[in-house]
Image (spheres, coloured by chain):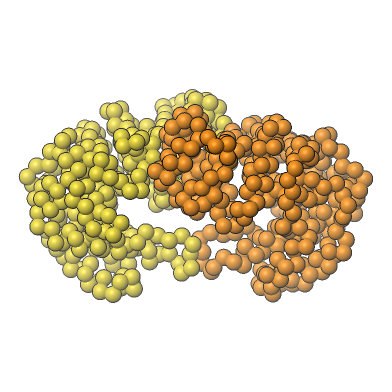
Chain colours: A yellow, B orange
Amino acid sequence: MAVYTDVTAEELSRFLAGYAIGELLSYKGIAEGVENSNFLVHTSTGNFILTLYEKRVAEGDLPFFLGLMEHLAARGLNCPQPVKNKDGGILGRVAGRPAAMVTFLEGMWHRKPTAVHCAGVGEALANLHLDGADFPMTRPNALSVNAWRPLFEHAGARGDSVRPGLCNEIVAELDVLETSWPRGLPQGVIHADLFPDNVFFLGDTLSGLIDFYFACTDTLAYDVAICLNAWCFEPDHSYNVTKGRALLGGYNKVRPLDAGEREALPMLCRGAAMRFLLTRLVDWLAVPEGALVKPKDPLEYHRKLRFHQTVKSAADYGL
Amino acid sequence: MAVYTDVTAEELSRFLAGYAIGELLSYKGIAEGVENSNFLVHTSTGNFILTLYEKRVAEGDLPFFLGLMEHLAARGLNCPQPVKNKDGGILGRVAGRPAAMVTFLEGMWHRKPTAVHCAGVGEALANLHLDGADFPMTRPNALSVNAWRPLFEHAGARGDSVRPGLCNEIVAELDVLETSWPRGLPQGVIHADLFPDNVFFLGDTLSGLIDFYFACTDTLAYDVAICLNAWCFEPDHSYNVTKGRALLGGYNKVRPLDAGEREALPMLCRGAAMRFLLTRLVDWLAVPEGALVKPKDPLEYHRKLRFHQTVKSAADYGL
């Protein structure tokens, strides 16, 4: 939950005067997203989301993120569509921060997704990959294999304060990942953060994908690996192969994984687990003693990593 | 900003099945209120606010708060109206907490209210006092003069860590307030917390009052004193008599203050400043070192108190 920057009614009215979306009736800061400030804005023509981009999002990346949403929405993917202002632009400034208005998506995210939801997210991810194929911009993945060792060194030896022996385990795994990281697989636009809170459903029907602020150009099957990590483990961190089968089945129906991608899946899953283990570890160690906000548990991904290390082939995931 | 309790889509759907307000389309935790968890709920029939009452609100007080909103809304005051469920009840449970659905009010609150807004809030406050006159329930003010010394003793000598000499000043003022507190003035339902963030406007027209969770039965003119403190000081804590004149003028137009209330106004303003100084002081001292959430500055009310101590008569407020 997050509202980092306060927006006054006067500022928002001035900003909205640049758009043809009616008169401002109300707005509320919403507890959604951890990187930016989000407001649900109600005007005489409907609901919109206003996002103020905070310091963790590089301003130079915004044309990629917003352009991608525009591109995907134009191809029929249900995602927030940036609203053009009267000058045709989609990026402005509010309260000193870069800001954009996007369309509002109905739907709720599921805290406890079922196999039906996993099938839906697999299908939607494959559609995103296909729809993104002709998106002309590129953005390197700043959180892929080359970034992991520097990230780990940033956390340093303090990792062992979270779990004794954790540092040695991470170093050994980084050695494997750096040597064996799959290269030459099909590349394209990936979402890179398609967790349950970024996928909306109405009933069991997927109604939209949100939060494209980690999207980048990378190995498509790595996005599948991120989703297996995010969707197919139970609260006790055991892998649920029924959900895995549903997610992979949904994906394959739209964009069948090729032989190379299938073979690489276990290593891609280890990498995905390492990426979230490391970013959560850094966030965990950055929070001062006694703070009221508790970051997400890094050890959840340590346990997922251990599972992936035991996987023999993609069949173990339900493929 | 606050969302203390997470609500799942399943729980919310189950809860809404008890109401005749259509199908759930989306809901967002909103950064509003500091005592409770609030969600903006969109159904096929419109927008509503769902409030989950957290531990600081006594469950036994909820029938008073919700009954009052119902009473005031029925008399035409613009305030959230509790929605009746299919059994005719207005109080339920969500995620283990007492919960109620209320109608959504359009409008924005002003960070920098002008004299026009102050006139509007004075008028609305007087209407609230008149409309509340025949509300049959009562609730003592748990934060009036008798509560202040215990509150101060709870903070204890640590008050001087916020400002050297503060404790002695508070004790001296409490002696005055306890001896001279105005009694026998007209009583009734008061809002008791009508700060700018609880008053919505569309343009310069007041569109609604919210947050009745400090409402109680007390001296009506004390509510006016709270508003003078909350609305008529500048960011540098100087009193703006133009705003004071507008607020008191708006109030008097609807419910003229009698001679006793006018005479008591300076002492009531001192008491109101003391009440917010003390609750903010306790909150300030309760926050652990290094926490990310910063409570409101208690010294703002120390400076307001000093102003009120110099006031000779209600005329100094613009009456």
* Residue name at image x 40 percent, y 43 percent: B9
In the rendered structure, the answer to whether residue B236 lies left or right of residue A93 reads: right
Q: Is residue B224 visible?
A: no
* Residue name at image x 42 percent, y 28 percent: A84
Spot occupied by residue A20 in the image (x, y as percentages of width and height): 49, 24
**Nearer to us in this view, A74 or A296:** A296
How many numbered dots are placed on residues in this image? 0
Spot occupied by residue B91 in the image (x, y as percentages of width and height): 57, 44
Residue furthest out toward the front: B87
Residue furthest out toward the left: A259
Quarter holding residue A150: bottom left
Spot occupied by residue B184 in the image (x, y as percentages of width and height): 88, 52
**Nearer to us in this view, B169 or B56:** B56
* Residue name at image x 70 percent, y 37 percent: B72
Quarter holding residue A270: bottom left
Q: Is residue B279 visible?
A: yes
Determine whether A211 is above or below A205 in the image. below
Residue furthest out toward the right: B259
* Residue name at image x 28 percent, y 65 percent: A152
Spot occupied by residue A285 in the image (x, y as percentages of width and height): 38, 66
